[in-house]
């Protein structure tokens, strides 16, 4: 029964997430020509190069709280149950953030929401790092979850605004490569 309920909840989330979505227009002739430039053509755009640099820095910083938060929680006197609750707060609010991001981005430029999420994540990570007690740590994780939603859910709509529809596949590959290269070593560097 539990798996069926979970599947129904996930299906419900997909339905809620699809509300207000619209089908993108077909590729124009100029867009199709832009797609023929090869996988490195996207780097001709200085905004995309800057975005890759920002994603590299953000990816390195984003994963650090998860690597060191348990130690921080122990240092401020949290029990293992309280630490588990803090992590659960992030996960729960991350789902809510993804749904909210879709609804907000349907009404305004998804690239603006996506970039705003990165700024919000920076503030939330600072709050998590400075948290002196359970309440502030839980609040910081809840806010980090909400802010993480747009970063995850609006990557492709944001790239569409940044590089155009035809270059999304190439841009997405490069963003994922940069993100992996910066995120994976973060826990090792954090100790």
Image: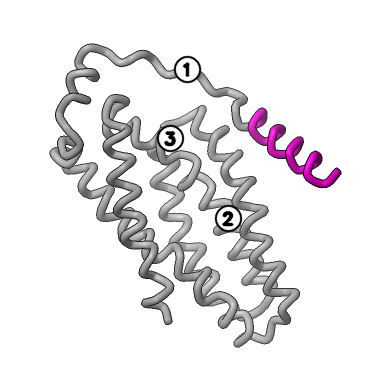
80 lies left or right of 189: right
- Quadrant location, the C terminus: bottom left
Residue at 38% from the left image edge and 15% from the top image edge: 25
Residue corresponding to mark 2: 145
6 lies left or right of 42: right
156 lies left or right of 6: left
Secondary structure category for the residue under label 3: helix
Q: How many marks?
A: 3
Question: Mark 1 or mark 2: which is in front?
Answer: 1
Q: Which sits earlier in the primary sequence, circle 3 or circle 1?
A: 1
User: Is disc 1 in contact with disc 2, using a CB cutoff of under 8 Å?
Assistant: no
Q: Give me the C-alpha separation between circle 2 and circle 3.
A: 18 Å
Q: Which sits earlier in the primary sequence, circle 2 or circle 3?
A: 3
Secondary structure category for the residue under label 1: loop
Q: Quadrant of residue 20?
A: top right
Mark 3 neighbour class, 10 Å CA radius: few under 14, some 14 to 19, many 20 or more: many
Which region is colored magenta?
1-16
Q: Is residue 188 above or below residue 169?
A: below
Q: Which sits earlier in the primary sequence, circle 1 or circle 2?
A: 1
Mark 2 neighbour class, 10 Å CA radius: few under 14, some 14 to 19, many 20 or more: many
Q: Is residue 176 above or below residue 185?
A: above
Residue at 59% from the left image edge and 40% from the top image edge: 100
Location of residue 132 in the rendering, given as x and y in whole percent from the top left corner: 61, 80
Residue corresponding to mark 3: 110
């Amino acid at each position: 029964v539990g798996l069926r309920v979970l599947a129904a909840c996930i299906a419900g989330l997909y339905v809620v997430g699809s509300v207000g979505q619209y089908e993108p227009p077909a590729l124009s002739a100029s867009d199709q020509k832009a797609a023929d430039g090869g996988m490195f053509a996207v780097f001709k755009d200085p905004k995309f190069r800057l975005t890759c640099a920002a994603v590299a820095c953000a990816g390195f910083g984003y994963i650090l709280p998860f690597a060191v938060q348990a130690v921080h929680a122990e240092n401020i006197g949290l029990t293992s149950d309280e630490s588990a609750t803090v992590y659960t707060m992030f996960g729960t609010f991350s789902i809510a953030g993804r749904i909210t991001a879709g609804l907000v981005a349907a009404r305004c430029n998804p690239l603006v929401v996506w970039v705003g999420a990165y700024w919000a994540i920076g503030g939330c990570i600072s709050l998590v790092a400075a948290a002196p007690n359970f309440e502030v740590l839980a609040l910081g994780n809840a806010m980090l979850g909400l802010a993480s939603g747009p970063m995850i859910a609006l990557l492709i709509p944001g790239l569409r605004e940044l590089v155009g529809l035809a270059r999304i596949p190439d841009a997405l590959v490069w963003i994922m490569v940069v993100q992996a290269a910066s995120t994976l070593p973060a826990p090792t560097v954090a100790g």
